[in-house]
Image: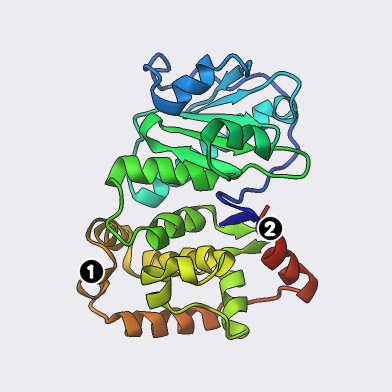
Amino acid sequence: MRLSPRCLAGTVIALLCACESAPPASPAIDWEEAAIGLEQQALADRQFVWHTLRGEAARVHYRPGSFAARHAVMLTRSGDASVRRAIEIVGIEHYEHPVDVFFFDTRADLIAFVGVPATGYADWESSSVFLVFSPTWRAFDTHEIAHVVSINTWGVPVEPIWWIREGLAVYADGRCREHTVQALAAEYLRRGELPYASDLIYRFANVGEMPGYLGSGSLVGFLYETYGVEAIHRIWQQGGDAIETVTGASLNAIDARWRAWLENVESDVEPEEWRRVIDDGCG
C-alpha cells in the first residue's frame, strides 16, 4: 500500500493517544532468542541508541527523545495487537518467534538503514520490522508484521507473489486513512477504475500503486471471507493459477463475484478525501 507518492510499504492502523503507564507484564516468549539479520545489525549500529519495551508478542525499539519514545507503551500494545491479528489471519494458534519492531523518526533514516525507498520494511528472516513514526506519519505495523508472520508460517508465495503477499497484508490491516479497504475498493468500482482480478494477479506492476494495493487487499479479502483461510493458504503455495482448482470457479467468474460483492459495500468517500488517498496514500 502506498505510504507516499515515492514509496511502497505498509500497514494502516489507527494510532491513538495513550497514557504512558507501566510497561506490559512479563512476556510469555523467550526473549533471549538470538538476534539475526537486520535486527542484529540495527542493535549493533553505533549510529542508533535504542531503548526497548517488551510486550507479550512484540518487542519495540525506539530512540530516546524520539516521537516513538513518547508513545512507547501505546506502540508496544499496538505491536502485540498486530501480531495477534497476523496470527488470526493465517489461522494458527501461536507464533513462536518474538517480533522486533524498530521505529525511525524520518524516512531518510529508515532508507539509510534498510537500503530501499520505504516507510515500512519487513525482514521476515529475523522476524523484525522497521517503521517510520512521526507526528505526520503513522506506523504501519500490522501490514509489515503480517508479512513476517505469513511468510514464516506459509513460506514465500509462489509466483506471481505481489498480489497475494501485499493483498494479505493490506487485508490484515483493513483500513486506509478513515476508510476500510473494501469501501475504497468499492469506490474504485463505482468510478469504473477497479482493476480486473487477472491484472492484479498477473500484471500487478502495471495497474498503479494505489489500485494495486487496495485492489489486491480487497480481492484477497473477498477470497478469504468467501472460501476461507485454507483456500488462501493453498493459493499462496500453489500460485494464482490454482484459483480455479481451489474455488471451483474460473478467474473470470471470481472477478464477477468479487465485483458483485463490492456492490453491497457502502462507499461514502468524499471527493476531497478520495483525492488525498490517491495523491498521498494511506499515511
The foreground one among 23 and 246 is 246
Judge whether 248 appears above or below 219 on screen.
below
Residue 222 in view here:
no
Name which of mark 2 and mark 1 comes first in the sequence. Answer: 2
Q: Quadrant of the N terminus?
A: bottom right
Judge whether 192 appears above or below 173 on screen.
below
Q: Amino acid at mark 2?
A: Arg
Residue at 59%, 24% in the rendered image: 61
Q: Which residue is mark 2?
A: 177
Residue at 40%, 19% in the rendered image: 35
Residue at 58%, 86% in the rendered image: 192
How many neighbours does mark 2 have within 10 angstroms: few (below 14), some (14-19), or many (20 or more)?
A: some
Q: Quadrant of residue 86?
A: top left
How many neighbours does mark 1 have within 10 angstroms: few (below 14), some (14-19), or many (20 or more)?
A: some
Q: Quadrant of residue 210?
A: bottom right
Instruction: Tell me the element at label 2.
Output: loop
Q: Are marks 2 and 1 in contact (CB under 8 Å)?
A: no
* Farthest-out residue, left: 245
Q: Amino acid at mark 1?
A: Ala
Could you tell me how far apart the alpha carbons at marks 2 and 1 are, in whole angstroms? 33 Å
Residue 160: x %, y % from top left: 32, 62
Instruction: Tell me the element at label 1.
Output: helix
Residue 171: x %, y % from top left: 49, 58
User: In this figure, what is the number of numbered marks?
Assistant: 2
Judge whether 26 appears above or below 147 on screen.
above
Q: Which residue is mark 1?
A: 242
Residue 260: x %, y % from top left: 47, 84
Marking on residue 143: none
Residue at 70%, 32% in the rendered image: 105
